[in-house]
């Protein structure tokens, strides 16, 4: 059980794609910082995220979404906004954290 | 649960150290403990005591100092990364004959082995890259 | 304490950022701790493994020279992502170390089997 974090935008970096390529079925993904642009329906990885999101377990840091003006209507429905306490909880619920940056 | 954090980003350059700070604060508020904060790469800049940000801006180095002192968190700055970037304590300043030091109280300068030690002795290691 | 399985995960190309060099320093430090240490090169990090990186003009240490010392530190479990090599037109013959090339599903399983991940 690995929690992956991605902090770069999929519009300019391939990190999110690289992460999804090796994410196991029981892994989770947290988008933070510029990684939250990956929650947009227009993101290059939107289809892959939506597919992956059917199994649940895609999160984005709410503070980073709000800071960037990303509103609910433009976001993929499979993404769950969480706060830092939620980030800590995710880290406890997974045995390891892999950070993509 | 026992956490350690590895911080690679400089304050005011990337969001990484800010995210790390907020994670650390949330972990402590949630009743968890922090075995060690390890500042590596550009993350060593969080340990300067000489930063003077505008008064209406977040003073992240000060926030770290307050958190570290309030919770007595072991906070290590990687010596190789720090000395390269001019983050230096009095002892190293004397060794390298530099005319000043700038390491903030609460931080100590040590080797990369402390990162490995932190990973081995914590339940979770969380890295904040820039 | 039993040795822990520690995997250092590299995702960055060398030189543009210091991350590759800093990762190697961490690996060398970790090698002194008698843990079960391995290295994984993903994505652009496979460029770290290229032969004949001539850094003389940059006055920097070359990873082509630095990485082959790893076996001397008993670091021999070294893996590269096959799909990353393929995407970049590279083969094992281009690499400075005798690495094991893994498919993505093998990488997932290998990461799952670790106790500790060090992300670089």
Image (cartoon, rainbow, N blue to C red):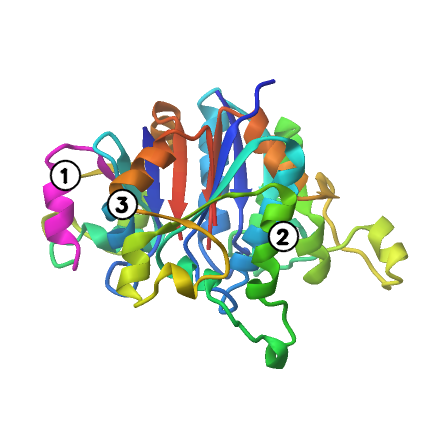
At 42% across and 66% down in the image, what residue appears? Answer: C94
**Vertical relation: B30 (above or below) C68:** above
Separation of residues labelled 1 and 2 (CA atoms):
37 Å
Residue B13 included in the magenta stretch of the image:
no
Image position, residue B40 (x, y; %): 60, 49
Q: Left or right of B72: which side holds A32?
A: left
Element assignment for label 1: helix
The residue that label 1 is drawn on is: A53
Residue A61 at least partly seen? no
Give how far across and how far down residue B120 sits, in percent.
57, 28
In the picture shown, does residue C66 fall above or below C26? below
Q: Which residues are magenta?
A: A44-59
Closer to us: mark 1 or mark 2? 1
Residue in the image at 31% along x and 34% along y: C109
Is residue B91 something that shows in the picture?
yes
Secondary structure found at label 2: helix
The spot of residue B85 in percent (x, y) is: 68, 62
User: For this view, does A50 lie left or right of residue B110?
Assistant: left
The residue nearer to you, when weighing C70 against B76, is: C70
Taking the image as shown, residue C118 lies to the left or right of residue A46, namely right
Front position in the image: A60 or C73 = C73
Which residue is identified by label 2? B44
Give the residue at mark 3: C104
Q: Chain of mark 3?
A: C
Marks 2 and 3, Cα distance to the nearest angstrom? 34 Å
């Amino acid at each position: 059980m690995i929690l992956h974090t991605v902090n770069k935008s999929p519009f300019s970096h391939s990190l999110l794609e690289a992460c999804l390529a090796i994410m196991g079925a029981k892994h989770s993904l947290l988008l933070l910082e510029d990684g939250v642009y990956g929650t947009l329906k227009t993101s290059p990885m939107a289809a892959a995220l939506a597919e992956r999101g059917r199994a649940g377990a895609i999160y984005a840091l709410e503070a980073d979404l709000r800071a960037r003006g990303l509103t609910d209507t433009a976001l993929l429905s499979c993404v769950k906004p969480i706060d830092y306490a939620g980030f800590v909880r995710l880290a406890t619920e997974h045995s390891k954290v892999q950070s993509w940056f | 649960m026992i956490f350690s954090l590895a911080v690679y980003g400089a304050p005011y350059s990337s969001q990484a150290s800010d995210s790390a700070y907020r994670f650390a604060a949330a972990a402590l508020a949630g009743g968890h403990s922090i075995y060690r904060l390890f500042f590596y790469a550009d993350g060593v800049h969080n340990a300067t005591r000489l930063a003077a940000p505008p008064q209406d801006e977040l003073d992240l180095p000060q926030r770290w100092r307050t958190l570290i002192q309030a919770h007595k968190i072991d906070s290590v700055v990687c010596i190789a990364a720090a000395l390269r970037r001019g983050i230096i304590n009095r002892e190293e300043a004397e060794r390298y004959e530099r005319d000043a030091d700038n390491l903030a109280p609460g931080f100590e300068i040590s080797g990369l082995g402390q990162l490995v030690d932190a990973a081995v002795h914590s339940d979770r290691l969380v890295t904040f890259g820039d | 304490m039993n040795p822990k399985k520690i995997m250092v995960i590299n995702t960055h190309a060398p030189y543009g950022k210091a991350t590759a060099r800093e990762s190697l320093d961490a690996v060398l430090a970790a090698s002194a701790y008698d843990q079960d240490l391995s290295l994984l090169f993903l994505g652009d990090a496979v460029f770290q493994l290229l032969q004949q990186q001539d850094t003389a003009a940059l006055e920097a240490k070359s990873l082509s020279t630095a990485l082959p010392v790893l076996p001397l530190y008993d670091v021999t479990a070294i893996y590269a992502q096959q799909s990353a090599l393929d995407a970049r037109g590279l083969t094992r013959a281009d690499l400075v170390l005798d690495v094991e090339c893994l498919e993505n599903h093998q990488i997932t399983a290998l990461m799952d089997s670790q106790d500790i991940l060090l992300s670089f």
